[in-house]
Image (tube, helix red, strand yellow):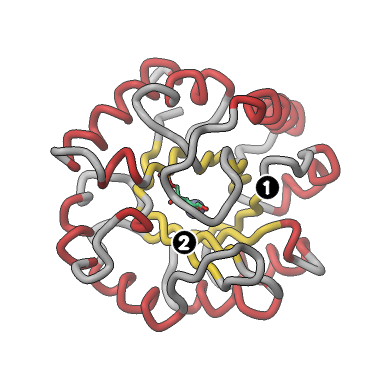
Amino acid sequence: MPALISPSILSADFANLERDLGLIAGADLVHVDVMDNHFVPNLTLGLPVVQRIVQVSPVPVDVHLMIEDADRWAPAYAEAGAASVTFHAEAAQAPVRLARELRAGGVRASVALRPATPVEPYLDLLAEIDMLLVMTVEPGFGGQAFIEGTLPKIRRARAAIAAAGVDTWIQVDGGVSRGTIARIAQAGANVFVAGSAVFGAPDVAAEVTALRALADAELGGV
Ligand code: DX5
Ligand code: ZN
């Protein structure tokens, strides 16, 4: 399974998003963090901005919704042309119905778990989703330290996916860097969000390549 790198534009220059998207043309996806100042204590951007990002991005758009009432808002991000839409389990009333609605809209459906949310109650959801996002920091801000205690959850999720015989991707988000990515890959993740590590690097494109190589070394690269 090849590693996929999804740089988070939360650490890009919001006045120069199109320019910064050009810097990550060698990435696999671009991660767009939508925050509503209710589910998380921060506010970023919404549907009109995502619609424009989809139009100008050189890579598919991976939307991470950190908003309340996901059931109501998530389908519009599928309609906007995102490749995948992630909603938080803690913010959805009917996650199976929502995942089915997203898939019917032609996007990869994904469920996110905060660091303290256990994966076990959601294992029966695996067949209904394309990706599970294990948050490895508390959602809301870039530049936080990776929470080591999330590694066992990634391992348990990978084992459950294997046991279920499904090919759900595991995405990790928060504190991913050259220093942490190898052991996160070893635990079983295959999609890596990195904000500050990528956009804070002196050579953004080279950082994407370096992170992918470190993860592929653990995943086998194929
Ligand atoms: C945080 C966001 C992340 C953030 C990660 O709530 O979901 O996507 O951009 O930032 P880093 O990679 O700097 O930890
Ligand atoms: Zn995110």
The x and y percentages for residue 144 are 48, 41
Is the residue marked 2 within 8 Å of ligand 2, measured from its CB? yes
Q: Secondary structure at mark 1?
A: loop
Is the residue marked 1 within 8 Å of ligand 1, measured from its CB? no
The x and y percentages for residue 111 are 66, 53
Residue 205 placement: quadrant: top left
Q: Secondary structure at mark 2?
A: strand
In the drawing, does residue 138 fall left or right of residue 195? right
Q: Residue at x 73, y 45 (%)?
A: 126
Type of amino acid at the residue the image marks with label 1: Arg
C-alpha span from label 2 to label 1 = 14 Å
The x and y percentages for residue 93 are 81, 69
Q: Which residue is mark 1?
A: 114
Specify whether residue 169 is in view. no
CB atoms of marks 2 and 1 within 8 Å? no
How many residues crowd mark 2 within 10 Å: few (<14), some (14–19), many (20+)? many
Q: Nearer the viewer, residue 204 or 196?
A: 196
Q: Which residue is mark 2?
A: 33
Q: Nearer the viewer, residue 148 or 4?
A: 148
Asked if residue 17 is positioned above or below residue 2 in the image, the reply reads below
Q: Earlier in the sequence, mark 2 or mark 1?
A: 2
The x and y percentages for residue 135 are 60, 43
Asked if residue 208 is positioned above or below residue 15 in the image, the reply reads above
